[in-house]
Image (tube, helix red, strand yellow):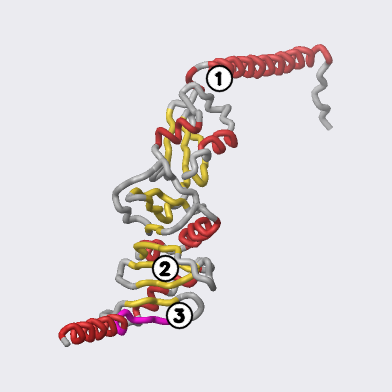
């Protein structure tokens, strides 16, 4: 049997030295690379390159973009890596119309502010001036207009109270189609129901209802109207049971009363 080659210690020493030298060189390269990366990172963080260059606002309809950016406090000197998200969100939400804020980063230096606004569910009228009412019941007295609004119903005979907040909450639950079909909502409290309301619809009908469960009951409005005679207009009662009361009998009675008065005057 052939004997294997035997290496002496002297023969192995150069290889060991070479391996150690290679390991030392690799460590040195790693340390030098880390060092330069740290230097580059520090220089980047201290330079304008790490600052926010672009702020984009999405989702806003009524609140101006410039106002949202100003509220956020973000400028071109704000660090891209040192954003205090919660503080920015709370600052933007100081505007009563802002319901929610989502912040997103896009490398290298762009920030997206996506906002969700409170719904303008109605308008309050005061001496010919209209004020938006938000879904939480807040009245925006700073945003007034003299033009008759068409994007939400007009509320008449309402005060800033719990009833108004409850009404706003119910309006926020309505589908856009039903909400847009309402022209005016009058607060008409009765002895038996302080929350009673009267609605004047764009199709010429009138609705007698109550604030409690208003949105749920109004969801039946389209199907109720579809079953009525299109030539008849009247009051749709939604307080307890649903029923329709036509204007026509009242008009006939008024005509008869006028005829009687005319006959009496002639006699």
| Nearer to us: label 2 or label 1 | 2
Q: Residue at x 41, y 68 (%)?
A: 198
Q: Residue at x 38, y 50 (%)?
A: 126
Q: What's drawn in magenta, residue-wise?
A: 243-249
Nearest to the observer: residue 58 or residue 166: 166
What label does residue 112 carry, if any? none
**Residue at horizontal 30 percent and vertical 77 percent from the top:** 233
Q: Can you tell which quarter of the image residue 157 is in? A: bottom left
Secondary element under disc 2, as helix, strand or loop, is strand
Image quadrant assignment for residue 25? top right
Residue 245 belongs to the span the image colors magenta:
yes
Distance Cα–Cα, label 1 vs label 3: 68 Å
Question: Is 218 placed left or right of 253 in the picture?
Answer: right
**Residue 55 on image: x %, y %:** 44, 32
Residue position for label 3: 242
Q: For marks 3 and 2, give the CA distance.
A: 15 Å
Figure quadrant of the N terminus:
top right
Going from the N terminus, do you reach mark 1 or mark 3 first? 1
The label number, if any, that marks residue 198 in the structure image: 2
């Amino acid at each position: 049997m052939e004997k294997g080659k035997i290496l002496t210690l002297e023969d192995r020493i150069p290889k060991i030295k070479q391996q150690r030298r290679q390991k030392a060189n690799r460590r040195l390269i790693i340390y030098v690379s880390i060092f330069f990366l740290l230097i580059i990172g520090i220089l980047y963080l201290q330079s304008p390159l790490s600052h926010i260059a672009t702020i984009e606002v999405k989702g806003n309809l009524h609140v101006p973009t410039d106002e949202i950016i100003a509220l956020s406090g973000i400028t071109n000197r704000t660090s891209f890596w040192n954003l205090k998200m919660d503080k920015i969100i709370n600052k933007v939400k100081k505007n009563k119309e802002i319901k929610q804020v989502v912040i997103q980063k896009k490398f290298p230096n762009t920030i997206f502010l996506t906002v969700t606004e409170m719904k303008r569910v109605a308008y309050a009228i005061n001496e010919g001036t209209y004020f938006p009412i938000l879904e939480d019941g807040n009245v925006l007295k700073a945003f007034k207009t003299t033009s008759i609004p068409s994007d939400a119903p007009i509320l008449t005979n309402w005060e800033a109270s719990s009833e108004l907040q409850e009404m706003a909450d119910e309006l926020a639950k309505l589908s856009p189609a039903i909400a847009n079909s309402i022209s005016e909502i009058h607060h008409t409290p009765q002895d038996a129901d302080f929350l009673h309301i009267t609605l004047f619809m764009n199709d010429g009908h009138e609705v007698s209802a109550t604030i409690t469960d208003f949105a749920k009951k109004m969801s039946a409005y389209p199907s109720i109207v579809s079953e009525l005679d299109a030539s008849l207009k009247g009051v749709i009662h939604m307080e307890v049971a649903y029923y329709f009361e036509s204007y026509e009998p009242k008009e006939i009675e008024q005509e008869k009363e006028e005829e009687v008065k005319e006959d009496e005057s002639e006699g």
